[in-house]
Amino acid sequence: MKTILKSLTLAIALILISCGGDKKTDKFGNPVSDGKENVEATKPEVSEFPLAEKGKEIFEGKGTCATCHKLDIKLVGPSIIDIAKIYKEKNANMVTFLKGEGEPIVDPSQYEVMKANFALTKTFSEEELESLEQYMYSQVK
Ligand code: HEC
């Protein structure tokens, strides 16, 4: 009788352990999602241009790029899409260009206008410049 009771207690203990084991909870005991549910839907954009969202903020914010560059129409400068297409085609490096260390390949006749911005872009970090590049690339399908 004792042994049956023992193994019964053991069995119950095992069941409790195995049930508790696969539910993830935070320190308050609330269930925690492991994030797997949403990965599929957002995957392509997130993995290809992880900095694009940050780049958009800089482009429209402190970079003031949006004053001259619109998505698909030429304003003062070429459109974002035109620039990104040409950079992709030629496999050019936008970060180098924005550091003032490259050559203009989109519209060299207007280079002086763009060049004035290097005073600002030269103060940006490598990651900020990469964000700008990723944002522009992410606008081309
Ligand atoms: C005062 C207007 C103006 C602003 C502000 C401006 N641009 Fe430009 N941009 C231009 C003009 C004009 C050109 C075309 C000349 C050229 O191709 O270099 C250009 C060209 C470019 C090119 C293509 C360069 C090439 O290889 O020919 C890139 C990339 C670019 N701009 C990025 C940016 C980014 C990023 C910002 C914000 C940090 C910015 N621009 C802000 C006017 C501007």
Image: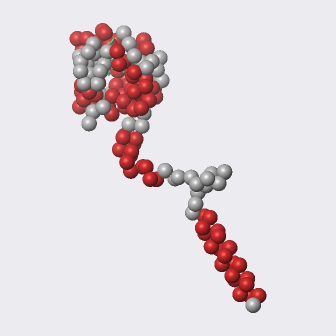
> Nearest the camera: 65 or 15?
15
Residue depicted at 64% across the width and 70% down the height: 16
Residue depicted at 65% across the width and 54% down the height: 29
Q: Is residue 73 left or right of residue 8?
A: left
Residue depicted at 40% across the width and 41% down the height: 46
Q: Is residue 124 left or right of residue 24?
A: left
Give ligand 1's quarter of the image. top left
Q: Is residue 87 visible?
A: no
Name the image quarter holding residue 92.
top left
Name the image quarter holding residue 105.
top left
Residue 43 place in picture, x, y as percent: 38, 46
Residue 7 place in picture, x, y as percent: 69, 83
- Which colour assignment does the render follow? secondary structure
Image quarter hosting the N terminus: bottom right
> Nearest the camera: 135 or 70?
70
Numbered circles on residues, count? 0
Residue depicted at 66% across the width and 76% down the height: 12
Residue 78 place in picture, x, y as percent: 25, 19
Q: Is residue 7 visible?
A: yes
Give above or below for 46 relative to 32: above
Residue 5 place in picture, x, y as percent: 73, 84
Image quarter hosting the C terminus: top left
Which residue appears farthest toward the bottom when viewing the image? 1
Give above or below for 35 relative to 109: below
